[in-house]
Amino acid sequence: MTTGLSLGVVVGYLLFALAVGLVAYRVSEATAEDYYLANRSIGTVVLLFTTFATLLSAFTFFGGPNLAFAAGPEWLIVMGTLDGVLFAVLWYAIGYKQWLIGDRHGYVTLGEMLGDRFGSVGLRALVAGVSLLWLFPYVMLQQMGAGEALVGLTDGVVPYWGGAALVTAFMILYVVLAGMRGVAWTDTVQGLFMLSVVWIAAAWVVSAVGGVDAATGAMLDARPDFGSFGGGTYTPGFIISTAITIAFGVTMFPQINQRFFVAKSGETLKRSFVLWPVLVLLLFLPAFMLGAWAAGMPVEVPDGANVLPVVLNEYTPAWFAALVIAGAMAAMMSSSDSMLLSGSSYFTRDVYRPVVNADASERREAWIARIGVAVFALLAFVASLFRPGTLIEVGDTAFSGFALLALPVICALYWDRTTRSGMIAGVLVPQVAYLAVVLSAVVGAVPTLPRTVAGGWDVALGLMVLSALLTVGVSLVTAPTADSDASRFAVTGD
Amino acid sequence: MSRLRRDLVWIPTFAVLVAFAVPWPLWGVDRVVAGLPVWIWWHVAWLGLCTVLFSLFVRSGAWERGMGRGRESGPGSALGGDRR
């Protein structure tokens, strides 16, 4: 009975999202620009929530409370700083600049913008290829999270593979039918839904345990170290390198970076920028504090299970717990939808069209994109069945991989003297080095290279510095190629 | 010109906003105020401050000048080069 109710809530939500997508499809024109960017007509509320919802994923919603439960509420500080403040500053420095440039030249992807500036198809394909590489584990992460969520929700009636498969099928169907306009609208619905549900959940649980004072008191009785700032996992090295790699990584995520091109007006970007820190806090505060407070609650969290569903099952009715899980799945779906869509546009525009078939019609390109989404999602689904690591491990790897792109891109945006060779060296070398670190942990035959050094400092942070040094250094010793055109990135005058 | 020079203040301002969103001065402090550890209140207040200052940054026009776009917008066209 409870399982039926829970499944009903989740399936009901999925159908609702599909309905929104179909309505959006009916008002869309079938061109590539509309499919990817909703004809650049996205307004403030939708842009804000579409960016917000794509940041929400299994990483934030399950990984965050889990870490707060195990290591203390400092995770709120790490995520709030990187998402609420550092990402907002980058939103201006990278996002607004890209919007201005994209507005002038009609770019749809990061690779397209850089390829045009440096007159290099190779750079364009390289940026797209690197992005698709790190997108793969991140899509996989959502499928893993969704599979685990349905197992927990239905008490194992729906097996892990069944949940992951259901979500994969739904993602493909949704993205293929609706494109960016559909994704943007469901993101808005999902973002509002998540914000409301997580506050109701916090209020419900806190009142059940006797108020905020009692919840914090019980937490400190069980884990006195949670009260003082820092300590344990949270070394300065961990806090700084996690905040920097994730914030810079997020700006290079295809689905986030592409959002920088979609705003209807500059005003939209400004308003979103101003509201961002508060919006981020509104989500993280209740979600992560619930995880931390759970340390003092008389609940049993089985190994490998997520904290949030356990707490909700203990203190709230079954239908409500199902609703929150539906919200979490909504967030993961939304992340996956956006990622798949952006990934497909990277593939068609930056790899397929320039390298394989330059004369493809727009209709053909749109169909290649849809087929690409299906293939990519299915491959990620197959990989997700092997469950190669925890949600946090898989997510962190992807964030750091993307972060290595950020400094060369900033260099290109602001420094006219940047050359094609500088960009290629600055992107390629750190990527190869980081890939070696990541693969050394997966391949048994080679010794595992360290991921962190000297008390929590992430090697990816060092590689970010290397990427900047290489981009600048190689640019200084090479001459701009004849095909490059620094004026492409000028945003003043006409 | 003096306006542009004043805009440079935003660079250290942003640096401070990012750096102290992490409550470093409260490292190791374990006081609980109004039900939450005091350093969580620091963070909450800090993000509120960020929104206020971000709003000031945008309204003062530094947002546009920072991209070198302060002057050339013709009469009638809103700052920010809105698409129509």
Image (tube, rainbow, N blue to C red):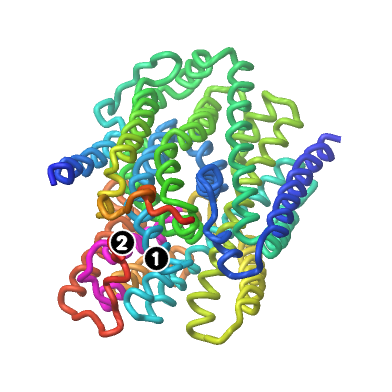
Image location (x, y in percent) of residue A477: 15, 77
Circle on res. A452: none
Instruction: Pinpoint residue A296: horizontal percent, then vertical percent.
Output: 53, 22
**Label 2 is found on which chain of the structure?**
A
Give the vertical position of B48 relative to A337 (above or below): above
Position of residue B66 measured from the top left corner of the image (x, y, whole percent): 26, 50
| Residue beneath the point at 26% across and 41% down | B14
The residue located at (38%, 49%) in the rendering is: B76
Q: Can residue A292 be seen in the rendering of this structure?
A: yes
Check disc 2 and report its element: helix, strand or loop.
loop
Q: What residue type is labelled 2?
A: Val
Element under disc 1? helix
Range of residues picked out in magenta? A396-424
Residue at the spot of label 2:
A491
Q: Is residue A179 left or right of residue A412?
A: right
Residue A415 location, x and y as percent?
Answer: 22, 65
The kind of secondary structure the magenta stretch mainly shows is helix
Residue where numbered disc 1 is placed? A104
Q: Residues within 10 Å of mark 1 (few under 14, many from 20)?
A: some
Question: Considering only vertical position in the picture, is A373 above or below B18?
Answer: below
